[in-house]
Amino acid sequence: MPTYEYKCDKCSFRFEKRQRFDEEPIAICPQCEGKVRRVFHSAPIIFKGSGFYVTDSRNTDVSSGAAKKPAKKQ
């Protein structure tokens, strides 16, 4: 069962409640009986493996900061 966080609009009281997915969300604050809203949080993202950093895709020659021009053939 997921845990949901709620916040009261009237008194700013925050609390958590374990509820099933099919249960109705809580609408009334247990302290002041004001209107309650569910607080949403962003999901954490973890980047694992190669390819996520600037240094993963660079050549070792480019690390000096100056781009080398190829020699022209005549």
Image (tube, rainbow, N blue to C red):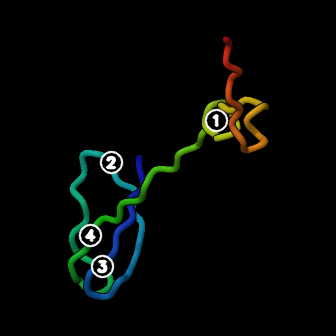
Q: Is residue 36 above or below residue 2?
A: below
Query: In this orientation, which residue lies closer to the viewer: 3 or 48?
Result: 48
The disc, 4 or 3, on the residue closer to the chain's N-terminal end is 3
Location of residue 18 in the rendering, given as x and y in whole percent from the top left corner:
40, 56
Contact between marks 1 and 2 (CB within 8 A): the answer is no
Q: Earlier in the sequence, mark 1 or mark 4?
A: 4
The residue under label 4 is 37
Mark 2 or 4, nearer chain start? 2
What residue does disc 3 label?
8
Q: Which mark is residue 65?
A: none
Q: Quadrant of residue 73?
A: top right
Residue at 68% of width from left, 36% of height from top?
67
Name which residue type carries label 3.
Cys
* CA separation in Å, label 2 and label 4: 17 Å
Name the residue type under label 1: Lys
Q: Secondary structure at mark 4?
A: strand
Q: Quadrant of the C terminus?
A: top right
As measured in the structure, the alpha-carbon distance from the residue carrying label 1 to the one carrying label 2 is 32 Å
The residue beneath circle 1 is 48
The residue labelled by disc 2 is 20
